[in-house]
Amino acid sequence: MPADKTISAELRRYIKKENISISSFADKSGINSGTLSRIINGNQSISVSNLDLITRAMKLEEGYFYTLYADECFIQSSLDWRRLGPFIMRCAELGKLECIDQVIGMMMDNLSYSSLLFDSAETLYQDENKEAALIIYKTVAESEKYQHAERLALCQYRIFTCSLNKDQENNLECAVQFESYVSRLSEAEQLDALKDLTNIFLSLRKWNKARYYAQEMGRISRNLYEQKNYRKKRNGKHIEPKKPLFGYILYSDLLLGAISAENGDYQEALYYVSCYEDQSWIIETDELAELTKDQFREWAIGNGYLYRIMTGNTTILDEYVEYISSRKDEILRALFKIVQAANCYHFDIDKYLERFEDIISDQLELSGTIGSYTVHIMDDRFANFLTDVGLYYLNKDNIKKGFKYILESLVISFKINNTANMVRCCSMIENIRRKLDNSDLQKYAAIMKEVYNPDEEKISGAIIHH
């Protein structure tokens, strides 16, 4: 590598090698020849837009000089936000995350950049470029001087949401790390943070934690709603979250009902259904408010059916299935509970499983949000649902079909690191091992080989005892 490894030196070497004039390269790149001459002679800093034009004219890949550009910014003590700001955003656009890390690490020697960097992270976050945003949030959070600053709490909230993935152990760690910061957010931001925490703890089956945060969301949203409508502030200003304020109240009751149902208390679950079904107290009547209210009324009808079925009332089963059949987003969620009820009260649901078999198969091919379920909740619920379907067929002595569903559940559980369900699947398969044929045993062995791969630490000894 040449001793004078700089962008201007590289440009000089290129012009000499190609035997072209500065004005010819200026025409080729689209940069003013005077500007180009000053850049070559080291008398003018290069903007990131001009750097991209130079790179393209030299027929190099986009971002080729970015690492060198970052170094030069600091060697020259040229900490000019007008250069660095666009450079960071361009690095994010090209996926040059190592350059972002390099630049902001050097910049944070000067804490005055914290605010500008935070604003850049917010822009990236809103643009769904969460990988780049996460790097900046982490650096800003580490540099915060005031530990109770709201910006620190907001950084931690963004770090939490950006770090979530399909690994349940990772998600638990992220939630635990964020918990101590949620109360430091503004009340409007708290509502979304509490909603996200509740959903994560629901997906992790941490019912007490989920209940606590759902109750907190309800308490804060009710207090804000009362302030807004019944205790007018002198300055007339009210905190407004992203969504209609009353929606957080209704959503709190929806979540509390779901938690009660998970704990087997269906009478309490039905009480919460009545809470979000009764909307007589809501003042708002605009279009968004009416759409929100309609959605909760729909959920109240569906959950009313569902929770009554879970108490053993099978007389409304056909009526409920017809109700959900026209609501595709609710079918899987309904089947989750119908299968549980069938296993509990021993009634036949073959016709429903056969009717919606394509929907189950489609979900095996994809991963995403279903209705009001986040991807984290959906993956967990679906894995457990497949195990429940497998159990249903085993109870009917349909070993072949039962094994098929349990094996599919084991694969998904391994991918999302749901150790508890992996143990459950393996225990059930071991119990029917003598009834399986060689091809089934080979499929099981192939999956377990992946589970026990030394490079994977998904199951950490839990299954070996079974």
Image (cartoon, rainbow, N blue to C red):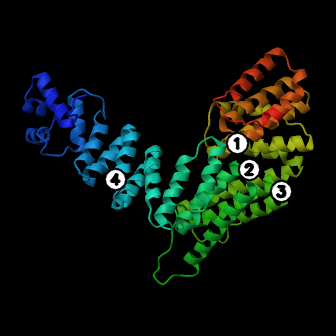
**Mark 3 and mark 4: span between their CA atoms?**
56 Å
Residue 266 bears which disc, if any? 3
Q: What's the amino acid at mark 2?
A: Arg
Q: Looking at the image, is 54 positioned above or below residue 117?
A: above
Q: Nearer the viewer, residue 388 or 49?
A: 49
Please count the marks in the image: 4
Q: Which residue is mark 4?
A: 107
Residue 234 visible to an observer of this rendering: yes
Q: Are marks 3 and 4 in contact (CB under 8 Å)?
A: no
- Which type of secondary structure does the marked residue at label 4 adopt? helix
Quadrant where the N terminus sits is top left
Q: Mark 2 or mark 4: which comes first in sequence?
A: 4
If you read the primary sequence from the N terminus, does the residue marked by circle 3 or circle 4 appear first? 4
Rendered position, 12 above or below 289: above
What residue type is disc 3 on?
A: Tyr
Q: Nearer the viewer, mark 4 or mark 1?
A: 4
Counting residues from the start of the chain, the first of labels 3 and 1 encountered is 3
The picture places residue 308, in percent across and down from the top left corner, at 84, 53
Which residue does the numbered mark 2 point to in the structure image? Answer: 205
Residue 351, visible in the rendered structure: no
Residue occupying image coordinates x 85% and y 16%: 437
The reply to whether the C-beta atoms of the residues labelled 4 and 1 are less than 8 Å apart is no
Instruction: Give the distance between the C-alpha atoms of the residues marked 2 and 4, in whole angstroms.
Output: 42 Å
Q: Earlier in the sequence, mark 4 or mark 1?
A: 4
Marking on residue 380: 1
Q: Secondary structure at mark 1?
A: helix
In this rendering, which labeled residue sits more in front, label 2 or label 4? 4
Residue at 29% over, 49% down: 84
Mark 2 vs 1, N-terminal side: 2
Image coordinates of residue 257 in percent, x first then y, are 75, 58
